[in-house]
């Protein structure tokens, strides 16, 4: 099975499990009008996501070599699956309370799950899929969740963090950049740049602890960006990670240096996190 098909299969299972959980929870809390309506809406929206994934799966049947820049390692899958699995377990044991339900929804929906969904749909959109519909669906889904959770005194509209480090992600694929930002946001403050030129502007204007950069980008490619960045801040020489799938000989010859940290596309989310931590701790 290809990496992309593997991710679509996993996402399909996630959406099915979430839809089932939200539907059962809606029945459990049917006397609470607002909560019942909120859970029913979530279940319906997960079903709509399933329709998009069915289209993605059909596209992959015709295009089995579709590429992805990320893969899902077992630890990452388990972490994302955990909230819905925990909620279903509480529900089956008759122990699902209102407060624990809200916690499950917040933890599940603010994980990497939705960003992975958007990244996959966007990757396939470039090869013929329908990305804008997915963006609209997820935006509506998140708005429903934020409005509902924000109505509670103890509600949450997302994780609140105090960061000690700053990671600069230089990537010209917007959906991949957003996914990477979500992946690293537990580790540090994450800032995004569309290409090397924007990356240089960030380095000039603020401190950066780690740089993760693509190579093939418009205006200023990753290698020229690296050279200029190191001139501006020599400490970045040991805190720079190339994340690339380039096959161009002139780039690959440069990247072959053992002094450089290079991650191939695709790499697993777990590997990306691990390497970011190692480089940040240097």
Image (spheres, rainbow, N blue to C red):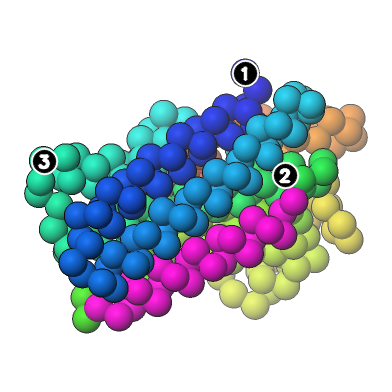
Disc 1 to disc 2, C-alpha distance? 17 Å
Q: Nearer the viewer, mark 3 or mark 1?
A: 3
Residue stretch in magenta: 130-152
Residue 232's quadrant in the figure?
bottom right
Q: Is residue 110 visible?
A: no
Q: Are marks 2 and 3 in contact (CB under 8 Å)?
A: no
Q: Is residue 94 visible?
A: yes
Residue 242's quadrant in the figure?
top right
Which residue occupies the foreground of this view, 2 or 252? 2
At 68% across and 58% down in the image, what residue appears?
133
Which residue occupies the foreground of this view, 61 or 155? 61
Q: Residues within 10 Å of mark 1 (few under 14, many from 20)?
A: few
Label whose residue precedes the other's in the sequence (3 or 1)? 1
Numbered disc 3: secondary structure: loop
At 40% across and 77% down in the image, what residue appears?
147
Q: Main structural element of the magenta stretch: helix, strand or loop?
A: helix
Residue matched to label 2: 123
Label disc, if present, on residue 1 of the rendered structure? 1
Residue 10 in the image, given as x and y percentages of width and height: 50, 33
Label disc, if present, on residue 93 of the rendered structure? 3
Disc 3 to disc 1, C-alpha distance? 36 Å
Q: Is residue 180 above or below residue 267?
A: below
């Amino acid at each position: 099975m290809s990496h992309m098909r593997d991710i679509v299969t996993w996402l399909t299972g996630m959406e099915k499990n979430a839809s089932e959980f939200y539907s059962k929870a809606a029945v459990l809390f049917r006397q609470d009008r607002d909560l019942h309506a909120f859970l029913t809406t979530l279940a319906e929206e997960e079903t709509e996501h399933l329709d998009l994934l069915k289209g993605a799966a059909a596209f992959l049947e015709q295009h089995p070599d579709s590429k992805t820049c990320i893969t899902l390692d077992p630890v990452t899958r388990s972490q994302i699956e955990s909230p819905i699995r925990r909620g279903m377990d509480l529900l089956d044991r008759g122990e699902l309370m209102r407060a624990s339900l809200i916690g499950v929804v917040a933890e599940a929906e603010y994980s990497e799950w939705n960003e992975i969904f958007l990244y996959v749909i966007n990757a396939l959109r470039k090869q013929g899929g329908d990305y804008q519909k997915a963006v609209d669906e997820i935006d509506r889904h998140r708005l429903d969740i934020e409005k509902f959770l924000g109505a509670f005194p103890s509600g949450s509209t997302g994780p609140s963090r105090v960061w000690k480090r700053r990671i600069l992600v230089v990537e010209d694929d917007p959906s991949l950049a957003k996914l990477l930002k979500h992946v690293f946001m537990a580790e540090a403050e994450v800032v995004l740049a569309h290409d090397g030129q924007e990356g240089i502007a960030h380095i000039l204007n603020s401190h950066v602890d780690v740089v993760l950069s693509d190579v093939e980008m418009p205006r200023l490619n990753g290698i020229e960006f690296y050279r200029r960045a190191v001139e501006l801040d020599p400490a970045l020489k040991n805190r720079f990670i190339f994340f690339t799938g380039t096959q161009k000989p002139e780039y690959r010859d440069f990247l072959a240096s053992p002094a450089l940290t290079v991650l191939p596309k695709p790499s697993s989310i777990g590997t990306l996190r691990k390497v970011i931590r190692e480089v940040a701790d240097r």
